[in-house]
Amino acid sequence: MPLHSPSLTNSAELSFLKRASLTRHPLTQRLFQLMERKQTNLSVALDVTSQTQLLELADALGPQLCVLKTHVDLLEDYTPDFGHKLQMLADKHQFLIFEDRKFADIGQTSSLQYAKGIYRIAEWAHLINAHIVPGPGIIDGLKQIGAPKQRGLLLIAEMSSAGTTAKGAYTRKTVQLAEEHADFVIGFISLRKLSDQPNFLHFTPGVKLKKGKDSLGQRYRTVEEIVGENQSDIIIVGRDITHAVNPQEQAITYRQAAWETLSRRCR
Ligand code: S5P
């Protein structure tokens, strides 16, 4: 059952341009607009261990994406110019960069992890995400760093893995915190639409062309289930694109499937 209360207009049926006009967050507006312009609600998770390979994939897949998701701490050949190089590709192909850091510490530590250390994530990632386990201080800590740079935060309200404890009251609390911090929080990592506020974007991982699972608890659902039945906005696809024989062709397949499903949903 969706958590949002029934209303006359379901925000999931509005076009992205309409939703862009209903938000004041500049990054959300930019994302809605670029999705509409490029006709894509596909995000790809580039979970590779080589920076060279990541940048090559970003260049090859960039035209198909609205958001490119990274795990920078997987890179074995990381160099400090990585962020700048990725930003140049983001400008070239018009996508946003989402560093999937899943911050989970007290506000002070999280803000340091975001701004400092080797990776200096705040300098190059438009989007980051966080667990709300520590309470609202984590949002305030990340906001201190990110808001002046017009960055955005996704709260992890649900997870795709089997046995996740992010459910029920925890998920509801996450939605409440997002609504209270909508000047910095732009949406959720979730399995479905959770909030009817049109400014919030729902990002869903655990996507394959056929339902299934991996050997470590990841669960996969189809584009139709996620964007159609569960009304999520953006699909996050990892290995089914990066491990494909032809990642470009596979990205086009996902992009078309996700956009067509969305187009049927929106009025
Ligand atoms: O609940 C989650 C949240 C995230 S962000 N489940 C996930 O799988 N993810 C991320 O999505 C995960 O870290 C990985 O980068 C991607 C899924 O990759 P795939 O290869 O299983 O499609």
Image (spheres, helix red, strand yellow):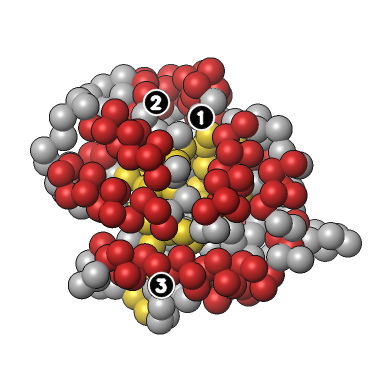
Front residue of 146 and 246: 246
For the image shown, how many numbered marks are present on the structure?
A: 3
- The residue at which mark 3 appears reads as 253
Q: Is residue 2 above or below residue 170?
A: below
Q: Which residue is rendered at x = 32% and y = 70% of the image?
A: 249
**Residue type pointed to by label 2:** Ala
Q: SS at mark 1?
A: loop
**Which of labels 3 and 2 is toward the front?**
3
Q: Is residue 206 above or below residue 15?
A: below
Mark 1 packing: few (<14 Cα in 10 Å), some, or many (20+)?
many
> Residue 151: x percent and y percent?
51, 29
Instruction: Name the N-terminal-most of marks 1 and 2.
Output: 2
- The residue at which mark 2 appears reads as 122
Quarter containing the C terminus:
bottom right
The reply to whether discs 1 and 2 touch (Cβ–Cβ < 8 Å) is: yes
Q: Is residue 201 left or right of residue 92?
A: right
Q: Which residue is rendered at x = 26% and y = 33% of the image?
A: 85
Mark 2 packing: few (<14 Cα in 10 Å), some, or many (20+)?
many
> Residue 173: x percent and y percent?
64, 46
Q: Which residue is rendered at x = 55% and y = 46% of the image?
A: 34
Q: CA distance from mark 1 to mark 3?
A: 30 Å
Instruction: Name the N-terminal-most of marks 1 and 3.
Output: 1
Residue 151 tag number: 1
Find residue 135 and report its image quarter: top right
Mark 3 packing: few (<14 Cα in 10 Å), some, or many (20+)?
some
**Residue type pointed to by label 3:** Thr
